[in-house]
Amino acid sequence: MTTVAIIGAGPLGRWLALSAARAGFRVLLEDVMPANLHHAQEMLRRQLGPDALPAVDFVSTIEDAVREADLAIDCVPDELESKLEILWLLDRMAPPRTVLATPTTRMSIEDLANCTYRPDKCVAIVAEAKSLTAGLSGEILLRTTGRTTAQTQAVVEEFWRRLGFVPRVELDSGQ
């Protein structure tokens, strides 16, 4: 896996883009708000320097972000309507090989994945955005469905390992 699409250039999206670029991934960062992309570009330029910045492409549509993505991570609010809408869009615009990962502390990935055509390629990242953006590494909890493939799980685990985390995987109990 080499290309990661990050949907949303708020604090979590910027942190993920920075961390993924530092870990050697090609990053496509998308946000519907041009000001968010501009702030992200300035922050990443300061943090990465001009030589590393080409590892991050700033795009204004979800379609452009996911077209070549091996992994797509949404950074939308942890609210049911937001999650359903973004997963619906990602599911329809991303190539069939793309794994969908969604940060959530309140929702069942089993339920969310069942709203897609690729429930075998959906994983929840169970972490508070504040704890991630604080730069803390350590253990990261990933929640899978009963249909998540071993390859899907491996893609998400490898992403977090390269970011300096130790992934722990558990099966969604259907909260």
Image: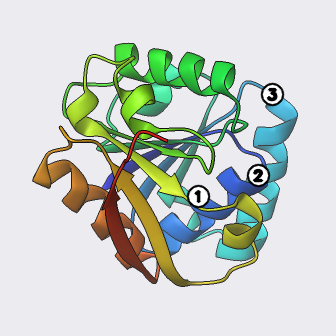
Per the rendering, the mark at residue 33 is: 3
- Residue 130 horizontal side relative to residue 25, left or right: right
- Residue 164 horizontal side relative to residue 152, left or right: right
Q: How would you rate the neighbour count of disc 3 (Cα within 10 Å): few for under 14, some for 14-19, many for 20 or more?
A: few
Query: According to the image, label 1 marks what residue?
Result: 17
**Circle 2 sits in a helix, a strand or a loop, which is it?**
helix
Question: Which of the two labelled residues, at mark 1 and mark 3, occupies the earlier sequence position?
Answer: 1
- Residue 77 horizontal side relative to residue 66, left or right: right
CB under 8 Å between callouts 2 and 1? yes
Give amino acid for label 1: Ala
Give the image location of residue 105, x and y in percent: 62, 51
**Circle 1 sits in a helix, a strand or a loop, which is it?**
helix
Query: According to the image, label 2 marks what residue?
Result: 40
Give the image location of residue 49, x and y in percent: 67, 74
Q: Residue at x 78, y 55 (%)?
A: 11
Per the rendering, the mark at residue 46 is: none
Give amino acid for label 2: Ala
Q: How would you rate the neighbour count of disc 1 (Cα within 10 Å): few for under 14, some for 14-19, many for 20 or more?
A: many
